[in-house]
Amino acid sequence: MAELDLSSALSVAQALIRCASVTPADEGALEVLDSALTKMGFTVTHLPFGTTPNLFARIGSEGPHFCFAGHTDVVPSGGGNWRHAPFSAEVEDGVLYGRGACDMKGGIAAFVAATAERLKRPLSGSISFLITGDEEGPATDGTVKVLGWMEQHGQIPDFCLVGEPTNPHKMGEVIKIGRRGSVNFSLTVHGIQGHAAYPHLADNPVHRLVAILQALTASPKDAGTEWFEPTTLQITSFDVGNPATNVIPAEATAKINMRFNDLHSSKDLAAWIRAVASKYADRFELDVQVSGESFLTEPGPEVDKLRRAVERATGVAPRLDTGGGTSDARFIALHCPVAEFGLVGQTMHKTDECVSLADLEALTRAYAGILDEFLP
């Protein structure tokens, strides 16, 4: 492995990008981090669960304990015509290209470079890294399992920052202090199969399911809260599986996705759907798959520290936000306060994913400033 310049986010980012760590593969990405963190004096623990590689590293044994969290796995490069090979980490005109440059190997590289800067002077407190290889995949053997290990070993931090891309257009725009919850429902209504010409001898489940869906979508679930948008319900599939035009089917299934704010839990929403369905159908099944509950880190002194550091580094006063999809912060929020700040997300998961070197440097300054705020 080539010698890394730990003070250079670019050097670390290139080394990480050149590891083709498409979920669930690692391809040496965690070894790159292990080498960098060990060189800085961290105690590094590899925590594989199932086929998922994970890493926890810490320097210092006292509080306050600040944790950087992120993932080294990436999505496939896809079939697009890349400007540069997706795992070559080429720089052109001040821009670093490669799968993971934005989401989120660039962020992890900035973690490392900012930490190297902070360790140039004595450390009061502790810094840790929680890194998984399972964020872009099923997320079952990654951060959630590492957090269980951390709980058992007294390693839960006082505050955690996730380095997901949070900025829509330019650095410094957005700090995420929460996320909506996400839950998927599969609702199957059972009827009685029959001839379409003799509906009185059958019980059409399609009619019942349509009535249920109309009731569920008749009005907004809520008007939102101070920090969250209104809860949304989207019907993503309606399937009867009936190739015949003259047969009333025996069952019909709809799939529903809900993104919900802090007024609800997935359990409450499942109970609501069951109650609505029972008004129109005697026989139905509801399968519930929870991606994550909503969470919020209330604005206060800790969030103020983040805002000050980001504004100093970027010249932009960040707004606090809870929009977007889910991230591993949903697991961390069950253990300690957590927020998210990272790069501009316009190219994540796209062909020619990239980050400007200026943004990578700005992120490193922001993370260094955040460490200064939490560990002065």
Image (cartoon, rainbow, N blue to C red):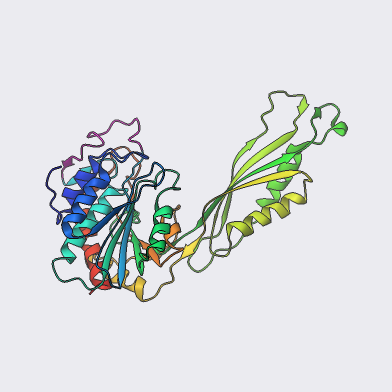
Viewer-side residue, 229 vs 126: 126
Q: Is residue 69 magenta?
A: no
The percent position of residue 313, horizontal first and vertical second, equals 22, 65
Viewer-side residue, 280 vs 250: 250
User: Looking at the magenta stretch, what is its main secondary structure?
Assistant: loop
Q: Quadrant of the C terminus?
A: bottom left
Can residue 212 be seen at all in this image of the molecule?
yes
Can residue 327 be seen at all in this image of the molecule?
no
Relative to 324, say whether 370 is above or below. Answer: below
Is 70 displayed left or right of 9 in the figure? right
The percent position of residue 110, horizontal first and vertical second, equals 23, 56
Please tell me which residue is depicted at 24% across the width and 37% down the height of the picture: 87
Q: How many marks?
A: 0
The percent position of residue 290, horizontal first and vertical second, equals 55, 51
Please tell me which residue is depicted at 11% across the width and 47% down the height of the picture: 3
Viewer-side residue, 338 vs 259: 338
Is 358 displayed left or right of 23 in the figure? left
Q: Quadrant of the N terminus?
A: top left
The percent position of residue 251, horizontal first and vertical second, equals 72, 35
Relative to 121, say whether 182 is above or below. Answer: above
Please tell me which residue is depicted at 27% across the width and 47% down the height of the picture: 30
Viewer-side residue, 189 vs 29: 29
The residue segment tinted magenta is 76-93
Q: Is residue 90 magenta?
A: yes
**Which residue reaches farthest front?**
153
